Amino acid sequence: MNNDLGKTEAEIIKFRQEKISKLEALHQNPYPAKSFKNYSNFRVVEIHKDLIEAGEKVFVAGRISAIRGHGKLSFVDINDSSGKLQLILRADELGDDIKIAELLDIGDFIEAHGGVIISKSGEVSVLADGLRMLSKSVRPMPSSWYGLKDDETRMRKRYLELAQSPDLRELFVKKSLFWNKTREFLSNKGFLEVETPVLEVTAGGADASPFITHHDALDIDVFLRISMGELWQKRLLVGGFDKTFEIGRQFRNEGISREHLQDYSQMEFYWAYANYEDSMALVEELYKFLAHEVFGTYQFNINNMEVDLNQKWEQINYTERIKKELNIDVLAANDAELVAKIKELKLEHKKSDTRGRMIDTLWKSIRGKIAGPAFLVDHPVEVSPLAKRKSDNPKLVERYQIILGGTENGNGYSELNDPADQRARFEEQASMREGGDVEAQMHDADFVEALEYGMPPASGFGFSERLFATFVGKPVRECVLFPLVRPEATAQNPKPKIKKSK
């Protein structure tokens, strides 16, 4: 049985390797290819009365999480993805397989065959009459002696945290449901799921710094996409598709924060013959659907603010709210006045910052106070290079963002389909890039050409997995199964470095 206490990790590994040799001496394969498991742990507990009444024996399997007792009688807890089940290992039932029981350790995957009983303590159990090793663990699972010492180690060895935390596993089950329900909602509304390129010769659809790699076969540098196929999905509108959406990974070579990662999941949809107001109504319905179907509630505590998705969603005027909070009219102010206000508020500022970047800096300084749910509307054109101008005020665009608990959790607008206007805005963005703004959008001449063939009026919208993280109240990094971490230092490579491309 488990005798790890008082031993170093190296001693435990050596001791367990010796057990592998003992298993092989018993003609037991410590790593067989197949299990005969026919019931999950949860199912055995759920229908235990029927199994007991029928006298049916079961095959169950899982990882050992606890061992109590030794010798001729022991109790072993095994876990599979459905939950925990107790095994009773008794010498008179197991026969020769009791020798296998003596070689078990916490962390081993095992299979047991036997009848279902209720133990003296009242716990549903399997009284094993057969036992088989499925995978012998050599390293000890983390414990108070061999724990995960810091966040980086925890993220690097996420599989260990998952193995020991049912709550963490449930988080990712819920995240899978979140995306499945997103697909269900959009599909039921007539949207077609599509796949667009991940590698692009022009990174477009967002203000962000892209990752660059080299395509050997074509001998060209390409970019990993920074949006969920925005310009590609608009080409699909040109091509005759009226409603499309995509869910996938996108990549932005930017900083890490509670709300930001470099690679993450995103959803974007595009809807022909609709404008941003149509889209807002659909998105409000989508958010309420996800809240109810995934979390069973419309009420959330987000950044210490109570947010009720079932209440009326406020519409907040972007420029008017800045004027109210900061006493500056960003539409009328010149660049020098914007710089002065940023310095007055002691906000971060670079000399290369464009007018749009400065306006956005001012907005973000007040965003955290807004609980929501709210639609932020009437953005200046400088911060929205792909959105259609408002007909009654060409300084503003038909755009909206979702505000929940002081965070931006979704972005949509009436899509720009005037090729001349789009070309002019791309040229302005190109000048910004030449001036040092690495997040300014690239000029995509091919997309402008597509618009010249005619794209119907349309609205687009997107949200990332930040929305899920917001709903569960965790940093987005905690909601990723295997977030990127620096390479681990080893004796052979004590200071690992990643080569930078030229």
Image (spheres, rainbow, N blue to C red):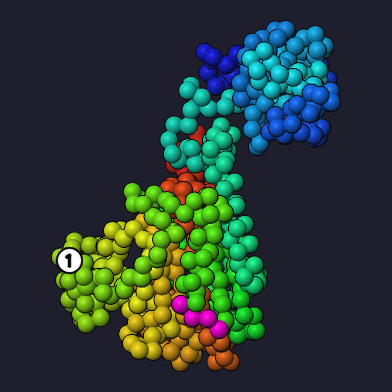
Residue displayed at 75% across by 11% down: 90
Residue 358 at what x, y percent from top left? 27, 71
The answer to whether one can see residue 202 in this image is: no
How many numbered callouts?
1
Image: 346 above or below 472 = below
Quadrant in which the N terminus is drawn: top right
* Residue stretch in magenta: 273-277
Residue 210 at what x, y percent from top left? 47, 66
Side (left or right) of 115 relative to 466:
right
- Disc 1 crowd rating (10 Å Cα; few below 14, some 14-19, many 20+) is few
Image: 312 above or below 136 = below
Q: Closest to the observer: 147 or 7?
A: 147
Residue displayed at 48% across by 32% down: 148
Q: Closest to the observer: 197 or 417?
A: 417
Residue 258 at what x, y percent from top left? 39, 51
The answer to whether one can see residue 395 in this image is: yes
State the image quarter where residue 108 is shown: top right
Side (left or right) of 437 relative to 458:
left
Residue 381 at what x, y percent from top left? 35, 81
The secondary structure that most of the magenta stretch takes on is loop
Q: Circle 1 sits in a helix, a strand or a loop, which is it?
A: helix
Side (left or right) of 234 relative to 329:
right
Q: Is residue 235 magenta?
A: no
Q: Name the residue under label 1.
A: 343
Q: Closest to the observer: 378 or 385?
A: 378
Q: Closest to the observer: 494 or 8?
A: 8
Residue displayed at 26% across by 63% down: 366
Residue displayed at 26% across by 74% down: 320
Q: Does the magenta stretch include residue 275?
A: yes
The type of residue carrying mark 1 is Lys
State the image quarter where residue 113 is shown: top right
